[in-house]
Image (spheres, rainbow, N blue to C red):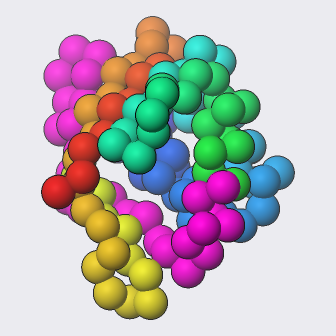
Amino acid sequence: MTRQQAIERLLSAWNINFAFDRAAVLASTVNDSFYYCDPHQQTPIIGAEQFAEFLSIYRDRVPNATMALEGLVQSHQSHAYFRFQVQREKAKFASGCYFADFDADGRIKRMVGFLD
């Protein structure tokens, strides 16, 4: 899986309503010690399981929202940068960017987000 594909697949997890299906996406894209942080989190999320719980809460709070990649993933060495947009009821709800790091197996090990 390319970095572009891994990011697209991970972002698709935000749009999945069923926890079991989200867990399958996360298992293929993030490593076990995955680190996630964004402005909505008081403390970082550590691990794929905790991140799956975060996504379940997100889906409950904004059930109509869809997350999508904006443009192409830019990467060098094991690092990547990309922009995203969240839409709700066909209108822009939020946007921002993420920085991600990949492990030697091509799975995402760290993702830090910023909102516009």
- Identify the image quadrant of the C terminus: bottom left
In the figure, is residue 67 to the left or right of 56? left
Residue 93 higher or lower than 8, as above or below = below
- In the image, residue 22 sits, relative to residue 86, either above or below, namely above
Horizontal and vertical percent for residue 106? 46, 22
Q: Does 107 sit above or below residue 62?
A: above
Give the residue at the far top of this rendering.
Answer: 104
Residue 58 drawn in magenta: yes
| Magenta extent | 57-82
Residue at 51% over, 49% down: 9
Up the image or down, 32 lies above or below 1; here it is above
Residue 39 showing in the rendered view: yes
Residue at 65% x, 18% y is: 32
* Residue at image coords 29%, 79%: 92
In the image, 71 versus 88, the foreground residue is: 88
Number of callouts:
0
Q: Quadrant of residue 88?
A: bottom left
Residue 29 in magenta stretch? no
Please indicate, yes or no, whether residue 31 appears anywhere in the rendered image.
no
Give coordinates of residue 66: x percent, y percent. Answer: 47, 72
**Residue 105 rendering spot, x and y as whole percentages:** 51, 15
Residue at screen point 67% across, 32% down? 50
Which quadrant holds residue 104?
top left
Q: Main secondary structure of the magenta part?
A: strand
